[in-house]
Image: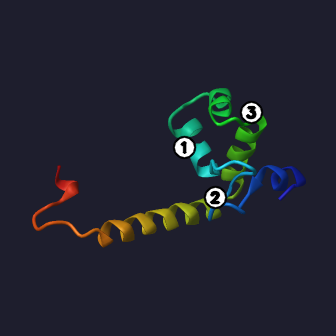
Amino acid sequence: MSEGDTRRIARDLMSEPHVRGRRISVRQVYALVEERGEDPEAVADRYDLDVADVYHALAYYHDHPREMRDVEQEREDAMEEFRESIDRPEGVDPDAA
């Protein structure tokens, strides 16, 4: 990891990489820009980031594919565990709607 990456990407607030000093994760930046097609400058404005922060987050995502897959799997596992822990009335299936 280069010096620039360590200044802009951190893991100190959440259990996944995020823009240092902000609560937006690398995975969220990736989803907004590359999956939803939002403009990097608009994302930077919305989340009070430098445009460079957005591009560093995207570079981090692509430079660390295994870590990002692991983070995504952890999130999916946590969501599944949470769904299973919900006590629903008999016959209620939220996925059947």
Residue located beneath label 1 in the image: 31
Mark 2 touches mark 1? (CB < 8 Å): no
Secondary structure type for disc 3 = helix
Q: Could you tell me if the residues under marks 3 and 1 are in contact, i.e. CB atoms within 8 Å?
A: no
Q: Residue at x 70, y 46 (%)?
A: 57
Judged left or right of residue 9, residue 76 is left
Which color scheme did the rendering employ for the protein? rainbow
Amino acid type of the residue tagged 1 in the rendering: Ala
Mark-to-mark CA distance, 2 and 1: 14 Å
The one of 13 and 7 positioned closer to us in this rendering: 13
Residue mark closest to the camera, 3 vs 2 = 3
Identify the residue at image location x=84%, y=52%: 7
N-terminal label among 3 and 1: 1
Q: Amino acid at mark 2?
A: Pro
Instruction: Give the amino acid type for the residue marked by disc 3 in the picture.
Output: Val
Residue bearing the label numbered 3: 51
Image quadrant of residue 38? top right
- SS class of the residue under badge 2? helix
Residue 12: x and y in percent read: 72, 63
Report whether 80 appears left or right of 52: left
Give the residue drawn at x 29%, y 68%. Answer: 86
Residue ID for mark 2: 65
Residue 9, horizontal then vertical, whole percent: 75, 53
In the image as oriented, which residue stretches furthest toward the left?
91
Q: Callout 2: few (<14), some (14-19), or many (20+) C-alpha neighbours within 10 Å?
A: few
Q: Is residue 4 left or right of residue 84?
A: right
Q: Which mark lies nearer to you, 2 or 1?
A: 1
- Quarter of image, res 70: bottom right
- Distance between the Cα atoms at labels 3 and 1? 16 Å
Q: CA distance from mark 3 to mark 2?
A: 22 Å
Please provide percent x and percent y for residue 2.
87, 55
**Residue that appears at 76% across and 35% down:** 50
